[in-house]
Amino acid sequence: MKISIFSNPGDASKQVSDALKAKIKAEKLTLDDEHPDIVITVGGDGTLLTAFHHFRDQLATIRFVGIHTGHLGFYTDWRDYEVDELIDSLAHDNGQSVSYPLLDIFIKYGNGQKERLLALNEATIKKVTGTMLANVYIKDQLFEVFRGDGLCVSTPTGSTAYNKSTGGAVLSSELKAIQVSEIASINNRVFRTLGSPIVISPNEWVRVEPVNSDENLMTCDQMMVENRLIDSVTFRISKQRINFAQYRHTQFWKRVSESFIGVKPND
Ligand code: NAP
């Protein structure tokens, strides 16, 4: 089995990744950063997002494993002190995996150019100065005229990230759905948006057509998309998925409860 270690630059993560590399060699597993079967990220969810985009062209053949070194750890099942246990699981790997939905983003620029992006957490389209004005279509039907800071479109596993800060719902990671949430919409007697998040199915898509499109910003996970005049952006659930090696099972709702509420049994 070919393994790549993808670490953030912090001292704690570097120590863990050095220990991992030594143990991988001792187990006669192979280190391969070009075409790995398994990518182990060391850091937090941010590190996993960076690794996801780094290996975006090999998603069909790669399984990810996340080790967290003191971060929040939504995508990271392992703690830094569990390296031996993880190596044992790798040595006895039988291909077990779990996969999650991704978000397809199709951008049409004002100059006619097109671009396709893929997000693990979310994409946002927003305006930094002034109000973003955009026509929002669902399945090519005009749904609303949006006025506000922007819109956030997230995957189920991304629903605990930016989406949650915008008042979006936390979606079960078992759902095949994407969620559109508003970022500071303007609602009064004159201007009106739905005012609540919406969740759409794999057979549906959302198209956002900004008016005055030259000052809008787009983000895709941790990255800012090159700032160009945007004609339209279409969001839909992707046919591609991200795979994780499932050596252990952390129940999704337990993770949500522990990360955001901190409730322990019998508290
Ligand atoms: P960052 O600003 O350094 O970190 C943002 C925080 O989001 C970190 O605590 C990170 O966890 C956490 N996070 C990432 N993915 C998550 C998920 N799926 N569920 C729960 N928490 C998650 O930026 P970054 O590390 O490069 O991550 C980029 C992400 O930041 C974006 O995809 C977006 O979701 C989020 N973000 C949120 C806001 C907001 O809430 N207002 C604004 C901008 C961006 P770790 O500490 O484990 O890395």
Image (cartoon, rainbow, N blue to C red):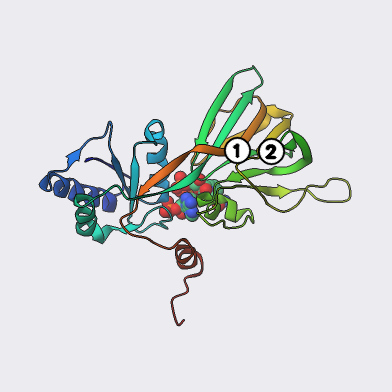
x, y percent for residue 34: 27, 31
Q: Is residue 118 above or below residue 155?
A: above
Which residue occupies 42% across, 58% down? Answer: 72
Mark positioned earlier in the residue sequence (2 or 1): 2
* Contact? badges 2 and 1 (CB < 8 Å): no
x and y percent of residue 109 in the render?
Answer: 63, 23
Q: Quadrant of the N terminus?
A: top left
Residue 83 location, quadrant: bottom left
The amino acid on which the numbered mark 1 sits, given as a three-letter code, is Arg
Residue 129 marker: 2
Horizontal and vertical percent position of residue 155: 54, 47
Displayed quadrant of residue 54: top left
Local packing at callout 2 (Cα closer than 10 Å; few below 14, some 14-19, many 20+) is few
Label 2 residue SS: loop
The answer to whether residue 257 is left or right of residue 33 is: right
Label 2, label 1: how far apart the Cα atoms are: 27 Å
Q: Which mark is residue 203?
A: none
- SS at circle 1: strand
Residues packed near mark 1 inside 10 Å, few (<14), some (14 to 19) or many (20 plus) = many
Label 2 CB, ligand 1: below 8 Å? Answer: no
Residue 215, visible in the rendered structure: yes
Q: Residue at x 58, y 47 (%)?
A: 177
Mark number, residue 236: 1
Residue at 27%, 58% in the rendered image: 80
